Amino acid sequence: MTNPPASEVLATWQALGTYFDVDGDAVFVLDVPPLYDEGKDPMFVLHGYPSCCYDWHHVLPDFGQNRRVVLFDYPGFGLSDKPNRRYSIEFYADAAERVAEFAGLESVVLVTHDLGDSVGGELLARDLDSRLAFGVSQRVITNGSIYMDLVQLSTGQQLLLGLEDAPVDLAAMGLDPKDGFKNGLGNTFSPAHPATDGELDQQWEFVSYLDGHKLLARTIRYIEDRRARESRYTGAIEKHPSPLGIVWGALDPIAVRAMSTRLVDARPDARLIVLDDVAHYPMIEAPDDFAAAVRVLLASA
């Protein structure tokens, strides 16, 4: 049996969600009710760069067994609108707050990955400042740039950061943006769990939706924000009183394993589960192991 075409996968995923208007931008939101409602706080899931909430499709059924799950694509990503503007962590956090408001979220389990860790850090900082409209009762954080001195940016990321903060049409320069994207993303997976060509084709369909791939040099500016305001984002990740669980792919070439151990040093009550043969995308590479780790961490808090 062959896998469905990537475009069919995108259409099916899009049909599962809805759109909220966030300051004039259409933001794609997936609001999944629990299979068995046990009255647990809903899970609010934040995705990473350069992908979208589709990253979580393998683990979504497990997450939704006994709690509601809300996911969305930041403006500039996935199935959301692609405004041509300066993107920032604060902008993504603003969108997250609006989505939470529309969804009626009052207290959440915050699950974050990659860029989502930084967006989550800003939300936690707002909570510590007593200006977040919803509460965070528990957290699970996974592979992301928590400590910038440890980050090993890929060649592609460095190239994008070196470009002007403006749309870039690689095809007009005679380059194949799809091949470049697939190669770059594929290099963040582990040898034990390599990305399949089908998975990479699907990821390309989402990143190129509404020409989102032309904005990668704009949406990556969160790295600049991360460097400028690390004490705010990382400080909140370390200090927020909600129980903290950490799941880390040990072979991540960008957000290296040392990130997780330093975070535990700063937050000794945090629980860490390391997936030894997994790299940057644990929810795609080893979804069963990742979902099981999240279950353990949430149950132990």
Image (cartoon, grey):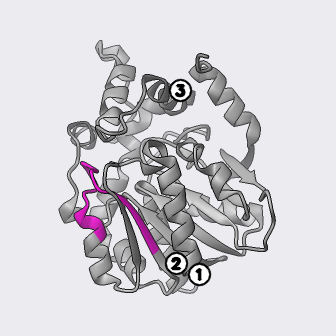
Q: In this view, does 238 lie above or below 102?
A: below
Residue at the image point whose x is 29% and y is 56% from the top: 250
Question: Where 288 falls versus 270 (above or below)?
Answer: above
Residue 248 within the magenta-colored segment of the rendering: yes
User: The disc labelled 1 sits on which kind of residue?
Assistant: Arg
Disc 3 residue crowd, few under 14, some 14–19, many 20+, Cα 10 Å: many
What is the three-letter code of the residue carrying label 3?
Glu
Of badges 1 and 3, nearer the viewer stands: 3
**Residue extending farthest top:** 174
In the rendered view, does 166 fall on the left or right side of 123? left
SS at circle 3: helix
One can see residue 121 in this view: yes
Dot 2 alpha-carbon crowd within 10 angstroms: few under 14, some 14 to 19, many 20 or more: some
Which quadrant: the N terminus? Answer: top right
Q: Earlier in the sequence, mark 2 or mark 3?
A: 2
Mark 1–mark 2 distance (CA, rounded to whole Å) = 5 Å
Q: Position of residue 229 (x, y in %)?
A: 32, 70
Q: In the structure shown, which secondary structural element does the residue marked by tag 2 occupy?
A: helix
Q: What residue type is labelled 2?
A: Arg
- Pointer 1: what residue? 131
Q: Which of marks 1 and 2 is nearer the N terminus?
A: 2
Q: Quadrant of residue 108?
A: bottom right
Q: Is residue 25 visible?
A: no
Ranked by sequence position, the earlier of labels 1 and 3 is 1
Task: Read off the residue under disc 3.
Answer: 205
- Crowd around label 1: few <14 · some 14–19 · many ≥20 (10 Å): few
Q: Mark 2 points at which residue?
A: 126
Q: Do the residues labelled 1 and 2 touch (CB within 8 Å)?
A: yes
Q: Residue at x 50, y 82 (%)?
A: 243
Q: What stretch is highlighted in magenta?
A: 245-260
Q: Position of residue 7 (x, y in %)?
A: 61, 21
